Structure formats: C-alpha cells, structure tokens
C-alpha cells in the first residue's frame, strides 16, 4: 500500500501528569459503542458480589467483590528508571503504536488487520473473529482480547473522527496539551513541529516496527554517583567527572553542592571509562559497565601528599 499521509501522535512524556483524562476520554468514546467498520464496543469494567456473600447495604468490609477489568486502548502507565537511592519515574500514555511494519498484521489472516493509506492500523472486527494470535504478536502489549465477542481489539487512533477532519479524542482531552496529532510527513503539522523541536523518537525502537506514535522527553539510562574525601568523608564539590564510552564520545559533569554528579541519556550495554579530577587530590580512574541506569555510590578521592 502506498501511504498518502502518515498520521501519528507525538507525546511529550515529560509533561504527562498521570491524570488519566486520555484514558477516560477514550472510554467515553468507545465503551459499549460500536463504531463500524473500525471497532466493536470497548468492554466496560464490571463488578459485583460473589454468590453467598452479603449484598450492598450490609456493614462495610463484610462483602467480597469481583472485578472484571475492561480495556484501556490508551493506557497511562508508569516507567521507572534506576534503583534506590536514585530512582526516576514518569507517566507514559501508551496507545497502539500504529506501526509501519505491524507484527499483528503479519500473523493475521483474511484481512483481519489492515493499514489505511494514512498509516492507521485497524483490526477488522468482522474478519478477526477467533484470531487470538493477533494479541500475542504485539510486542508492546497494546492489543486486548474480548472473550465475549471472540475478537482482538485496540486503539483505532479514532479513525472515525480523523475521517471527519478531527483529532483523536485523547488529543483534545489532554488538559496540558501533551499529545499532538498530525501528518508526520508534513513539516507544518502540529505533531511534526513538536517532533522536530524535541527530537521525538519511538518507544522501544529495538522492536523494529517503525511506530507512528513518537515520544519526546522519555527517561533514559543514567549514571550517577557522589565524590567524597577518602580521608575525612567530606563532600567534594566542584570535582570534574569525565565519562568516555567505547564509542569515543565523552561527557563531562561537575559535582554539585551535595557532591553529586549525573550523566543522563547514556547508551546501555556499553563500557565506560570514568575519571574524576580535583585540585589537591589524586585522580581516580575506573571502568564502569552500564547495563541499566545505576548509581555507583560514594567514590573516594585522596589528598595529594597525605
């Protein structure tokens, strides 16, 4: 198929406040609402009391409730990077990624999954009956199985609204305007402008699916630590820390008032040479293998001539 446009989202992850308005707006649009030919109604969350247990109106705590969760076609998940005591977290809206090379379409049959000429990926509710393999094919886990209807379901990027020249529901609902929609091949679209200004990128690019959902401000692996006097334990501010990777790229940081340093946005699965320098102290040199975001704790520098 030749794409006429490449519709997508650019999500500013570092602005998301985890309010779940995008999730709620999606449910408002799709729960129990058939929008054919793009989707059958999104299942609602259901709950009730187990048989034999007290019913509503009895004292609190004496009844037991069952819950059958519905589907979140856009989910506001949480990403955590690092470990105690240096941990960073952010909320991350996660819809279907509407991949240019969608794994779900590869495993489907009979036209169950197709890509429109604007790049939006659709699971056909009529042709996808019984094709549970479509769920497991998504590396992002963004396809749900509707056991009542025996079909897979996911975000349609509000294709019915896009057909009317409107934005997807989550875009207009976001109270801080962190979700942007448009043609990613049009430099004048809102999404493209934000993508260019903020170096937006795919989530999990290693999956190789070429998503049209891009993110700006994603948390990246980092290396942090603290520099102290090896004799007195005093915090050493103003020390110069130089980190050089096996790719030859160097990064420099200066310890702050708490003697902390941090190198954000590093590449993982790489060996780094770390050198710490401060007037009146011997240099410290060490090798660090970065397999994930990590804090290497207190690093001692010893005074010259002691």
Image: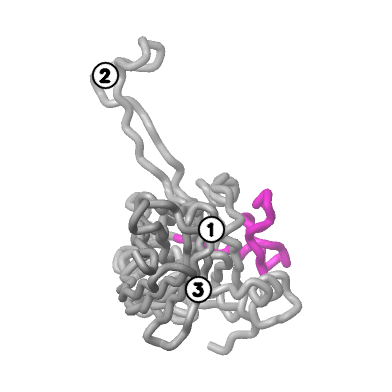
* Quarter of the image with the C terminus in it: bottom left
Q: Which circle, 1 or 3, is nearer the viewer?
A: 1
Q: Quick one: SS at disc 3?
A: strand
Residue 118 image-quadrant placement: bottom right
Where is residue 12 shown, x and y percent of the image? Answer: 60, 62
Question: Can you tell which mark lies on residue 53?
Answer: 2
Query: How far is mark 1 from mark 3, CA to CA?
Result: 33 Å
Q: Which residues are magenta?
A: 154-181
Say left or right for 159 vs 70.
Answer: right
Q: Which residue is mark 3?
A: 202
Q: Residues within 10 Å of mark 1 (few under 14, many from 20)?
A: some
Are discs 1 and 3 less than 8 Å apart at CB?
Answer: no
Q: Residues within 10 Å of mark 2 (few under 14, many from 20)?
A: few
Q: Is residue 266 something that shows in the picture? A: yes
Where is residue 285 shown, x and y percent of the image? Answer: 35, 75
Where is residue 277 shown, x and y percent of the image? Answer: 45, 72
Q: Which residue is mark 1?
A: 256
């Amino acid at each position: 198929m030749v794409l006429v446009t490449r519709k997508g989202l650019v999500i500013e992850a570092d602005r998301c406040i985890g309010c779940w308005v995008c999730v709620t707006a999606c449910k408002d649009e799709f729960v129990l609402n058939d929008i054919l030919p793009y989707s059958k109604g999104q299942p609602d969350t259901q709950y009730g009391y187990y048989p034999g247990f007290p019913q509503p109106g009895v004292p609190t705590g004496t009844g037991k409730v069952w819950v059958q969760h519905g589907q979140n076609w856009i989910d506001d998940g949480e990403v955590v990077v690092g470990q105690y005591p240096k941990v960073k977290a952010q909320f991350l809206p996660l819809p279907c990624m509407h991949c240019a090379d969608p794994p779900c379409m590869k495993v489907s049959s009979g036209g169950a999954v197709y890509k429109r000429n604007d790049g939006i990926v659709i699971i056909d509710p009529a042709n996808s009956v019984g094709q549970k393999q479509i769920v497991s094919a998504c590396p992002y886990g963004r396809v749900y199985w509707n056991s009542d209807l025996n079909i897979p379901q996911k975000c349609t990027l509000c294709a019915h609204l896009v057909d009317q020249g409107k934005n997807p529901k989550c875009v207009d609902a976001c109270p801080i305007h962190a979700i942007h929609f448009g043609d990613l091949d049009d430099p004048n679209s809102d999404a493209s402008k934000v993508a260019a200004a903020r170096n937006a990128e795919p989530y999990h690019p290693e999956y190789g699916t070429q998503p049209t959902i891009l993110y700006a401000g994603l948390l990246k692996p980092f290396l942090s630590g603290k520099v102290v006097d090896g004799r007195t334990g005093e915090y050493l501010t103003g020390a110069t820390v130089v980190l050089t990777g096996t790719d030859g790229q160097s990064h420099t940081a200066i310890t702050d008032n708490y003697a902390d340093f941090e190198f954000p946005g590093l590449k993982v699965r790489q060996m780094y040479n770390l050198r710490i320098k401060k007037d009146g102290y011997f240099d410290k040199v060490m090798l660090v293998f970065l397999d994930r975001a990590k804090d290497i704790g207190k690093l001692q520098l010893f005074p010259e001539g002691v």
